[in-house]
Image (cartoon, grey):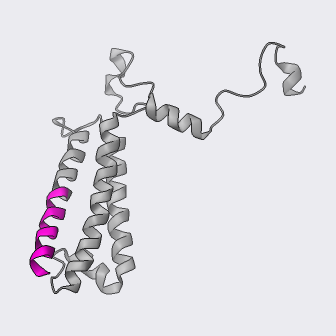
Amino acid sequence: MELSQALPKNRIEKDRREFSWRTVLYAFARSRRQSHRRSVDDAVVFLDGGHPWLFFLATGTMLLSCADAFLTLKLMGLGMFEANPFMQAAMERSTVWFTGIKLAMTAFGILVLVFLAKARFLNRVRTGLMLTGLFTMYACLVCYELVNLFNRL
């Protein structure tokens, strides 16, 4: 039996659950489930949508990580050294390797923190708050690098 024969005459053939970019934009603008429906679901930490603030923090942290990678390379060209031994080893291999590892590690960390944003770390601190701390640390690091860059120019 074909799909058109199985459906009643007043139903449309297009499946409303079909994925499209409209679905992504609608889900971002109007996330459906911001809180749990039942009290027994309080242990579940994953919801359909996150707070828009998480999007700002995740995007901002990734942009600051890109700025950090660029400024680190610029400052190393001016005579400074990389303090992180792991990143120093990556930099000795190549700048592309350094940048790729740095951005991949940051992106993975952000993904995990956004995914677990409603969870509590050690039953005390909400994981979403850690993303705020990461954003703040990257902002301070970029400011520090900018001050060093201006002092060396």
Q: Is residue 127 above or below residue 45?
A: below
Q: Is residue 81 above or below residue 59?
A: below
Which residue is nearer to you in this view: 72 or 151?
151
Q: Is residue 60 above or below residue 9?
A: below
Residue stretch rendered in magenta on the structure: 139-153
Location of the C terminus by quadrant is bottom left
Q: Quadrant of residue 46?
A: top left
Q: Is residue 2 above or below residue 65?
A: above
Compared across the picture, whether 97 is left or right of 74 comes to: right
Which residue is nearer to you in this view: 66 or 123?
66
At which x and y percent is residue 137? 16, 56
Magenta segment includes 137: no
At which x and y percent is residue 44? 36, 29
Compared across the picture, whether 58 is left or right of 15 comes to: left
Compared across the picture, whether 6 is left or right of 70 comes to: right
Q: Quadrant of residue 128?
A: top left
At which x and y percent is residue 142? 19, 63
Q: Quadrant of residue 63?
A: bottom left
Camera sees residue 116: no
Magenta segment includes 146: yes
Location of the N terminus by quadrant is top right
